[in-house]
Image: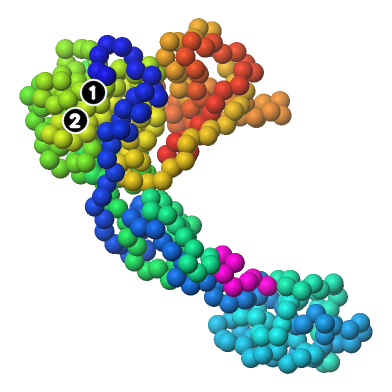
């Protein structure tokens, strides 16, 4: 697939994912440490959740047939949460609290705001139907059912669900170990003074943040000298430590673009140059059996190519379940007069204009303008060979969806 032709995005993704084996190494972690990890085993419900019928409100448990107009029901019991109830005495009500188990014999709960109390008991002020305000046993999770499948990324809500099942230790897939190599002799770490011709190393920190959000473990993060030998050494050392290597810069056609050249002569370069904008100079290959994703050097291009190419690759390697991107179809509030032969990903955000939600684009879409991504909330997709005028409907992907 390597060559001078521009590869369509779908073809590039199919190629990468076909060469992305899923992680097989597993470990067991405490539930408190499971956030953003990937389940290594199906989680089956060991017991009904909730384990018994319980009250959804503070109020009174009773039998509907015991209610008679003008006749108070005496209160025969008080049922705190966490204590097993005694059977309800017929013709009476029981004071009950949210989460308390329903006493045998009761068939409904009346919330306290619908009741008047007196020395004689309670008078119900509203219609009562059987089963009201009762949370049934197993209504959340029924014993034996599949609660969470293998490959689920554990979010806060999954942590809570596992806790509700009594799970304290969680089997997860090992974290994907990623090495970051940034190329360019002009790059300086923040905190150091800039010399003539130097700039700060933006891509290192963008990639660190993206990989942390993606649930990866960064095992190496280095700047690489702009020489063929230094690039070869860095890639080979990274291959010994990582499951995936991500580079920025060094994949274009210049004499100092050594990543692509090293993959060609010391590894395997199977993909180069995509039909997307920004991000055309992207490379994919292997060195020492470890996949290498070579991203462009421009900061906005790094972000776009990571989201559109890097995240699908990482999700596949991590073994996580993922549904197809859906995006939103919204009218554009910007104009592009001349369509590109490449699919364009425009840094954009949703805005309300004249009562309609639309997509506004950042004014400067240069691949070196990272401020555009801070202003934006996602990417609008302009198909190949397509001009855009205000009102044209485009697909918009939020950053949150692209990173999910």
Question: Is residue 347 shown to the viewer in this render?
Answer: yes
What residue is shown with label 1? Answer: 270
Locate residue 122 relative to residue 270 in the image: left or right: right
| Mark 1 vs mark 2, CA separation in Å | 8 Å
Q: Residue at horizontal 65%, vertical 29%?
A: 357
Q: Is residue 131 magenta?
A: no
Q: Please, is residue 296 above or below residue 321 in the view?
A: above
Determine if the magenta segment contains residue 136: yes
Residue 1 placement, left or right of 328: left
Query: Which residue position holds label 2?
Result: 286
**Magenta stretch secondary structure, dominant:** loop
Give the secondary structure at mark 2: strand
Image check: 88 left or right of 360? right
Q: Which residues are magenta?
A: 134-140
**Residue drawn at 20 percent across, 12 percent down:** 254
> Decide: marks 1, 2 in contact (CB < 8 A)?
yes
């Amino acid at each position: 697939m390597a060559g001078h032709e521009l590869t369509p995005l779908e073809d590039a993704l199919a190629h990468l994912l076909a060469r992305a084996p899923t992680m097989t190494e597993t470990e067991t972690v405490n539930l408190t440490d499971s956030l953003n990890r990937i389940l290594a085993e199906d989680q089956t419900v060991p017991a009904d959740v909730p384990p018994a019928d319980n009250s959804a409100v503070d109020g009174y448990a009773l039998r509907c047939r015991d209610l008679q107009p003008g006749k108070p029901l005496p209160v025969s019991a008080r049922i705190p949460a966490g204590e097993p109830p005694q059977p309800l005495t017929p013709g009476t009500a029981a004071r009950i609290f949210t989460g308390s188990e329903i006493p045998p014999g009761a068939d409904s709960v009346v919330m306290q705001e619908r009741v008047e109390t007196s020395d004689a008991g309670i008078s119900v002020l509203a219609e009562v139907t059987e089963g009201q305000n009762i949370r049934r046993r197993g209504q959340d999770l029924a014993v034996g059912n599949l609660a969470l499948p293998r490959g689920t990324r554990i979010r806060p809500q999954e942590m809570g669900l596992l806790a509700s099942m009594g799970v304290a230790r969680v089997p997860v897939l090992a974290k994907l170990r990623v090495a970051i190599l940034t190329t360019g002799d002009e790059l300086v770490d923040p905190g150091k003074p800039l010399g003539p011709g130097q700039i700060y190393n933006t891509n290192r920190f963008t990639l660190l943040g993206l990989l942390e959000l993606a649930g990866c473990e960064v095992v190496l993060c280095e700047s690489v000298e702009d020489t063929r030998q230094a690039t070869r050494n860095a890639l080979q050392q990274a291959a010994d430590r990582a499951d995936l290597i991500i580079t920025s810069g060094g994949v274009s056609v210049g004499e100092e673009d050594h990543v692509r050249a090293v993959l060609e002569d010391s590894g395997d370069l199977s993909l180069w140059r995509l039909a997307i904008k920004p991000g055309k100079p992207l490379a994919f290959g292997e060195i020492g059996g470890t996949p290498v994703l070579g991203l462009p050097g421009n900061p906005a291009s790094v972000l776009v190519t990571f989201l559109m190419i890097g995240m699908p690759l990482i999700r596949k390697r991590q073994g996580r379940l993922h549904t197809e991107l859906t995006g939103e179809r919204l009218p554009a509030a910007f104009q592009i007069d001349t369509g590109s032969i490449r699919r364009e990903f425009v840094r954009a955000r949703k805005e309300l204009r004249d009562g309609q939600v639309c997509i506004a684009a950042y004014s400067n879409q240069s691949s070196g303008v990272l401020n555009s991504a801070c202003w934006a909330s996602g990417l609008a997709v302009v198909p190949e060979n397509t001009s855009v005028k205000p009102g044209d409907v485009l697909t918009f992907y939020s950053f949150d969806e692209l990173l999910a």
